[in-house]
Image (cartoon, rainbow, N blue to C red):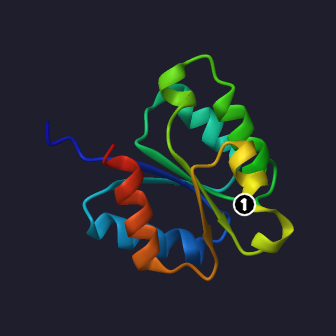
Amino acid sequence: MSASKRVLIAEDSSVIQNLARKILEFQNYDITAVKNGEQVLQILEKEDFSILLLDINMPIMDGMECVRRVRALSDTTKAEVPIVAITGNAKNYTEEEFKTAGFNDVLVKPLNFDRLVEVVNQLTDK
């Protein structure tokens, strides 16, 4: 029962990826990190996660495309995983666009790490 909650972080910035990893590992989360949305889909084929954190602007496949593809997966457990957008330019999208794409919440850069922990805790404690 004490299986740790697994977080998949997709973020092309190593600095943000490493900071988020350290903060969440300190909260006893098991972290896997990748650099783009295509890698998210590849790893989701083999593994399950409690939550996904997706950067909006990534090479190869961005967060908006990735969330749509995850939500369209035939495995309903994976398709319904909580997904949080991480963005440095939230002004490019409305909150409604994030919700319509399939995100459960949005975190704006520079990341507020207290808010990161709060959102991850909320969405994984369901």
Residue 76 appears at what percent x and percent y? 53, 21
Residue 66 horizontal side relative to residue 74, left or right: right
Residue 93 horizontal side relative to residue 67, left or right: right
Kind of residue sitting beneath label 1: Glu
At 67% from the left and 42% from the top, the residue drawn is 102
As helix, strand or loop, the secondary structure at mark 1 comes to: helix
60 w.r.t. 75: above or below: below
Most extreme residue toward the right, as rendered? 92
Residue 25 appears at what percent x and percent y? 32, 64
Most extreme residue toward the left, as rendered? 1
At 41% from the left and 58% from the top, the residue drawn is 120
13 w.r.t. 34: above or below: below
Q: Which residue is mark 1?
A: 95
Residue 82 appears at what percent x and percent y? 50, 44
Q: Quadrant of the N terminus?
A: top left
Q: Quadrant of residue 119?
A: bottom left
Crowding at label 1, few (<14), some or many (≥20) Cα neighbours within 10 Å? some
13 w.r.t. 10: above or below: below
At 65% from the left and 32% from the top, the residue drawn is 71
Q: Count of labels shown?
A: 1
Residue 63 appears at what percent x and percent y? 72, 52
Q: Quadrant of the C terminus?
A: top left
